[in-house]
Amino acid sequence: MLHYFSIPGFFNAPLAWSSVPQILSGLPMSVYLTAVSFVCSLILGLILTLSQLSHSRLLHGLSRAYISFMRGVPMLVVLFIIYFGFGANALPAAIISFTVVSAAFVSEVFRSAFMGIDHGQYEAAYSLGMSYGKVIRYIILPQAFRIGLPALGNILLDMFKSTSLAAMITVSEMFMDAKIVAGANQDYMTIYITIAILYWLCCVVLTTGQNWLERHLDYQRRAERLAKHA
C-alpha cells in the first residue's frame, strides 16, 4: 500500500514510515529543550523589558544593546560560540543559546504589550498603596501576557524548530536521529521530507494549544457568552 505513495528516486514511502519511530525517539529531547529554553527566555525577557522601561539610562542602554545584538546574530553562531568558544557541554550550551537569543524577541513582545496598557492602571494601583513589584506582578504582567500571547506563540514555534540546530553540537534530538537514519539508509531526501512533516505536525499541535489558551484568556468573549446564556 505504501508503495503507491513513493516517488522513484525522490521519496521512499515504506522507508519513511518505518523510520518514524526512530526519529520520534528524539522528540522528548526536542520538547525538553523547547520547554526549558522558553521558560528561561520568558524570565530573562521580562527582566530585559523592565530594564528598558526603567528610568535608569544605564539599564536602558545595556538592555537595548543586548537586544539589538541578539536580534542581529544568527542562532547557530551563538550556539557555536557557547559550545566551542566557552567549552560548555552540549545540552547546557543549547539551552543557554536558545534562551539568550529568544529572550531578546520576548522582551520586545513584552515591551509593546506593557506600552499598550493604559498608564492610568499604574496610577490607580499606586493610589491603593501597591508597590511597583505588586503592580507588575498582579496587574500589568497578566494583561501583557494575554496581549502578547500570539507573538509569544510564534516565538515558541520558532524555538521548537530551532532545536534542530542542537544536532550540530551532538544533542540527540529529532533531527540528529533523522540524520542517523538517513545516513544508515543512504536516502537523505526521504528522511528529510519525513522529518519536515513531523516538525509540521508538532507545530500544528502547539498552535492548537496556543489557540485554546487565547480563547481561554479572552475574558471579554467569555463574559459575552455568559451574558447571552444568563
Image (cartoon, rainbow, N blue to C red):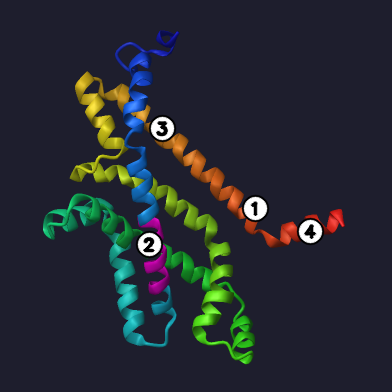
Apparent side of residue 96 relative to residue 148 in the rendered image (left or right)? left
Find the distance from the CA under tag 2 to the CA under tag 3. 25 Å
Apparent side of residue 132 relative to residue 36 in the rendered image (left or right)? right
Find the distance from the CA under tag 3 to the CA under tag 4. 38 Å
Find the distance from the CA under tag 2 to the CA under tag 1. 24 Å
Label whose residue precedes the other's in the sequence (1 or 3) = 3
Secondary structure of the residue carrying numbered label 2? helix
Marking on residue 41: 2
- Which secondary structure is most common in the magenta stretch? helix
**Residue that label 3 marks:** 198
Seen from the viewer's position, the closer of residues 92 and 99 is: 92
**Residue that label 1 marks:** 215
Label whose residue precedes the other's in the sequence (3 or 4) = 3
Find the distance from the CA under tag 4 to the CA under tag 2. 34 Å
Secondary structure of the residue carrying numbered label 3? helix
Residue 178 lies, with reference to residue 133, above or below; the image says above
**Residue that label 4 marks:** 224
User: Which stretch did the figure color magenta?
Assistant: 37-48
